[in-house]
Image (cartoon, grey):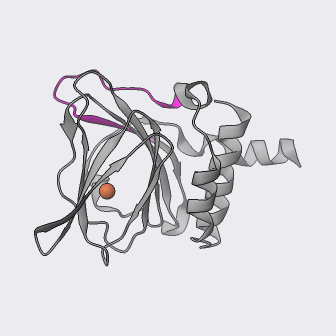
């Protein structure tokens, strides 16, 4: 992991802890994805039953938020889901995704989320599903949640990079 990426996760962590949610899209948009920055944090479950792999980067205490990297196999999708009591931001680190947004079980929009794009959803916007439509390429996304109890907790974490030693890093840069 590069220092630049570690600083991004550190800054996102600070924004979550301070509930400075306006900063989060700014931080995510300010980062330009480079595979070498985060490659070691995108470990894929190669089991063919697994549509997408969840790697945990940060799980803050007191329900203050969580940061994950997801690796999407080609031609796969999530189910339609809500994010109870949580904001959810997604930045595309590699490839691209399609997002479908639903209100009252009706599809209200379909958005292409391209490399470096940032999407945002909460339950007042609606529920959503994400699709990697590529038949050849995986996609990699960075997910920031303002609540640890997001509804995906019943899906397995494949690799846990628990909090990335951010406290140690903070000592080094001070
Ligand atoms: Fe979601």
Instruction: Please say if 170 is above or below 41.
Output: below
Q: Left or right: 17 with respect to 142?
A: right
Residue 127, picture quadrant: bottom left
Q: Left or right: 124 with respect to 92?
A: left
The residue most toward the bottom is 124
Query: x and y percent of residue 87 in the render?
Result: 42, 68
Q: Left or right: 106 with respect to 153?
A: left
Q: Decide which of 43, 30 is in the foreground and name it.
A: 30
Q: Decide which of 141, 117 is in the foreground and name it.
A: 117
Q: How many marks?
A: 0
Is residue 29 located in the magenta-colored stretch of the structure?
Answer: no
Q: Decide which of 11, 23 is in the foreground and name it.
A: 23
Query: x and y percent of residue 3 in the render?
Result: 73, 35
- The residue sitting at 52% across, 67% down in the picture is 64
Is residue 51 located in the magenta-colored stretch of the structure?
Answer: yes
Q: Decide which of 171, 113 is in the foreground and name it.
A: 113
Query: x and y percent of residue 67 in the render?
Result: 49, 51
- The residue sitting at 26% across, 30% down in the picture is 134
- The secondary structure that dominates the magenta segment is loop
Rendered-image quadrant of the N terminus: top right
The residue most toward the left is 105
Query: x and y percent of residue 63 in the render?
Result: 48, 67
Q: Quadrant of ligand 1?
A: bottom left
- The residue sitting at 67% across, 51% down in the picture is 10
Instruction: Please say if 85 is above or below 5.
Output: below
Instruction: Please say if 171 is above or below 86.
Output: above
Give the residues drawn in magenta, as a range: 41-55
């Amino acid at each position: 992991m590069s220092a630049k990426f570690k600083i991004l996760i550190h800054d996102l962590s600070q924004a979550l802890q301070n509930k400075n949610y306006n900063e989060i899209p700014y931080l995510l948009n300010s980062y330009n994805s480079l595979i070498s920055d985060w490659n070691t944090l995108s470990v894929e479950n190669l089991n063919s039953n697994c549509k997408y792999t969840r790697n945990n980067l940060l799980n803050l205490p007191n329900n203050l938020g969580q940061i994950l990297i997801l690796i999407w196999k080609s031609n796969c999708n999530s189910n339609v889901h809500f994010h109870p009591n949580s904001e959810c931001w997604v930045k595309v680190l590699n490839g691209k995704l399609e997002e479908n947004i639903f209100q009252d079980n009706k599809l209200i929009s379909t958005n292409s989320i391209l490399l470096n794009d940032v999407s945002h959803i909460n339950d007042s916007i609606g529920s959503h599903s994400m699709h990697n439509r590529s038949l050849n390429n995986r996609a990699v996304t960075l997910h920031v949640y303002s609540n640890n109890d997001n509804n995906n907790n019943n899906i397995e974490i494949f690799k846990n990079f628990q909090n990335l030693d951010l406290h140690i890093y903070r000592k080094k840069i001070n």
